[in-house]
Image (cartoon, rainbow, N blue to C red):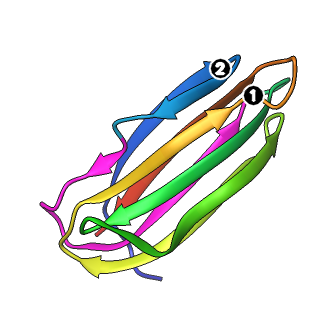
Amino acid sequence: MKEYQRESVSWNGYTDTISSIDNLCLYNTQLWERCEIYIQGYEGKNTICMLTLISNGEIHKNGRMERIKITGAESRIYVFEIHKKVSVIAAGYISNPSVTGGGASITLTGFL
C-alpha cells in the first residue's frame, strides 16, 4: 500500500440554528492525489450537513453532498480523486434538526 503525505484543515462548531463551514481550503501548492472529507458528529447532538467540494474553482465530480444526517457521535467519510495541482475547498453548512442543537467536526485532508 502506498504511503501518502497529508495535509489537513478542520472546522468545529455547535449550532442552535444554522452555521456556515469556513476556512476549509487546501491551496494549489501541492499535487493532490486525492482528498477526504471526514464528518464527526457530537454525542447527544443531531446534525444535518450540506457540503460541496470545489476543485480548481468548479464543483468536483460527485462533490455535492446534500442533507447528510449525522446522529450523535456518528461519523462519515467521503473520498475524492483529484490528481491535480489545484486548490481544494469544502464549503457548506450544518443545521440543527432537533431541540438538542447540532454540532460536528469536519476535516478536509489532502493526500500527496
Overall secondary structure of the magenta section: strand
Outermost residue on the left side: it is 29
SS under mark 2? strand
Q: Is residue 63 above or below residue 107?
A: below
Which sits earlier in the primary sequence, circle 2 or circle 1?
2
Image x and y of residue 106, in percent: 54, 41
Image x and y of residue 5, in percent: 31, 63
Please name the residue shown 49% across and 32% down the image. Answer: 20
The 10 Å Cα crowd at callout 2, few under 14, some 14 to 19, many 20 or more, is some
- The range drawn in magenta is 24-42
Q: Quadrant of the C terminus?
A: bottom left
**In the shown orientation, is residue 47 left or right of residue 20?**
right
SS under mark 1? loop
39 in the magenta segment: yes
Q: Quadrant of residue 59?
A: bottom left
The label shown at residue 96 is 1
